Amino acid sequence: MEDRRESKKKYYQDNKEKIIKNRRKYRQDNREAIREKSQKYYQDNKEKIGKYYQANKEKISEVGRKYRQENREKIKEVKIKHYQANKEKISEVGRKYRQENREIIKGKNKRYYQENKEKFKKYRQDNKEKIREVERKYRQENKEKIKKYRQDNKDKIREESKRYYQNNKEKISECGRRYDQAHPEHIKRKNHLRRTRKQDNGGTYTIKEIQKLRDQAWGICLGWKKKPHWVGDGKLTIDHIIPISKGGRNDIQNIQLLCGRCNSSKGNKIYSK
């Protein structure tokens, strides 16, 4: 018996490549038959397999772990190759599974997130730019899809936003305060929009449009009852040529940049250099 085992071992070592090649070819040619046979065996021996697994759990895990560590690149290559050959089928199976098990998946994801909060937080902090870029790219490539989802789920989104706000009031307020401190022009824009709505004047502008105006101004104030003069970009403020209080629109065509002193002197008078 021992001699026979040794003989088989020697034959395998001498013909390893050939045997592996033949096995692979056999599996490829008889894929369905092998699958059916495996499934039948599993169904007939479920209890036996379960018992064996429970009795040798650690050993099986260790063998699998060791194999994965030693064959990382090989496994990766096989997975990629398999995915490329069965892309449509895999996508369809995944889609079907997700549709049928939405709540289970949601529960698992929620549980996993709760158990690994710090890990997620650290990853987000370490990969801020990468995540932002991926999200931006996704939004650009799926504009219509996102639009359709929002239209189809208006009530759901509104309810989720409301719930999130109720549960995170302090956090949202703090984020808003920090953002406003870092972006003073956004505060001015919000105030202008509020006043415009109150007066029912109409019009709006973007921060990009203001920035473009700043780039064109080169730090020069147009002046109020005096000649244009240089003050530097940081000292230029937004002024409505026709003030909002006098019916002026809140759009870029009705905006000029003046220094703080000229803007204060002008007040709500209608005048432009």
Image (cartoon, helix red, strand yellow):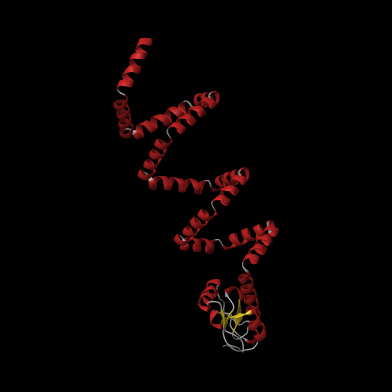
In which quadrant of the rendered image does the C terminus lie?
A: bottom right
Question: From the viewer's perspective, is residue 53 above or below residue 260?
Answer: above
Q: Residue at x 46, y 62 (%)?
A: 140
Question: From the viewer's perspective, is residue 47 above or below residue 112?
Answer: above
On the rendered structure, is 254 left or right of 89? right
On the rendered structure, is 174 left or right of 14? right
Q: Is residue 1 visible?
A: no
On the rendered structure, is 163 left or right of 136? right
In which quadrant of the rendered image does the N terminus lie?
A: top left
Q: Residue at x 66, y 62 (%)?
A: 178
Residue 5 in the image: state x and y as whole percent.
37, 14
Residue 16: image quadrant is: top left
Residue 173 in the image: state x and y as whole percent.
68, 62
Q: Is residue 136 visible?
A: yes
Q: Residue at x 59, y 48 (%)?
A: 122
In terms of depth relative to the viewer, which is nearer, 197 or 48?
197
In terms of depth relative to the viewer, which is nearer, 157 or 140?
140
Question: From the viewer's perspective, is residue 227 above or below residue 184?
Answer: below
Residue 131 in the image: state x and y as whole percent.
52, 54
Residue 165 in the image: state x and y as whole percent.
66, 60
